Image: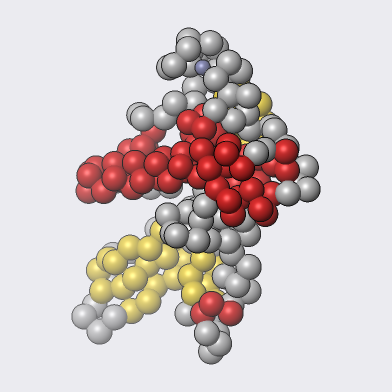
Amino acid sequence: MLIHLGMSGRLRVVSANMPAGKHDHVDFHFEDDQVLRLSDPRRFGSIHFSSDPVEAHWLLKNLGPEPLSADFSGEYLHHVSRHRRQAVKTFIMNAQVVVGVGNIYANESLYRAGIRPRNAAGRISKDRYVELERAIRSTLEEAIAMGGTTLRDYVGSDGKPGYFRQELFVYGREGKRCLRCETILKGIRLGQRATVYCPYCQH
Ligand SMILES: [Zn+2]
């Protein structure tokens, strides 16, 4: 069984007699009167059953490497980006290229690497992709470390990473000053996603 959490899916272990809320869709009952409950306010999640090896499932077989694994590198990003005209931000958010780089992390990583989000992926040099790879790793590692220390107190049910937000350089800060150079940060839409960058630090 494979559970896709979509954008807002969440699994919790609760008592079987806890009434289901509006966004609770599925309960898996255990023998000890506890249930694994799937909540999904936006309903992009799904549950799949298959007897094939899990890696062969269509949801997983075309996925790119994990960003914190040894398979992920600047050389790899450079290699797979050749001849791609799409924006580098859209490119790194594509799960077939690399998994787990959502919108917030893409914004933050590009800022740290000094790369403008709209630049064509296919025209970025290998050296700059090595910078970007490091930026993606450090951004994710810091987010995980912060989540690891504060997640216990984190009760947000909207799926938003409130525990990471206080450390963000650009995401959600359009119109404010860059923390490095004090230039006003610019906000644009890219692939329908909120995109913020510093016109001075990122080029
Ligand atoms: Zn700046």
Q: Position of residue 64 (x, y in %)?
A: 58, 61
Q: How is the image coloured?
A: secondary structure
Q: Position of residue 194 (x, y in %)?
A: 60, 33
- The residue lying furthest to the bottom in this view is 51
Q: Is residue 174 above or below residue 37?
A: above
Q: Position of residue 128 (x, y in %)?
A: 58, 37
Left or right of 166, for residue 178: right
Q: Is residue 130 above or below residue 12?
A: above
Residue 93 in view in this figure:
no
Count numbered badges in the picture.
0
Quadrant (top left/top right/bottom left/bottom right) for the C terminus: top right
The residue drawn where x is 66% and y is 53% is: 79
Q: Nearer the viewer, residue 173 or 197?
A: 197
The residue drawn where x is 48% and y is 16% is: 178
The residue drawn where x is 60% and y is 46% is: 92
Residue 29 in view in this figure:
yes
Q: Nearer the viewer, residue 66 or 81?
A: 81
The residue drawn where x is 25% and y is 68% is: 15
Q: Is residue 169 above or below residue 57?
A: above
- The residue lying furthest to the front in this view is 127
Left or right of 99, for residue 123: right
> Quadrant of the rendered structure where residue 199 is?
top right
Q: Position of residue 13 (x, y in %)?
A: 29, 66
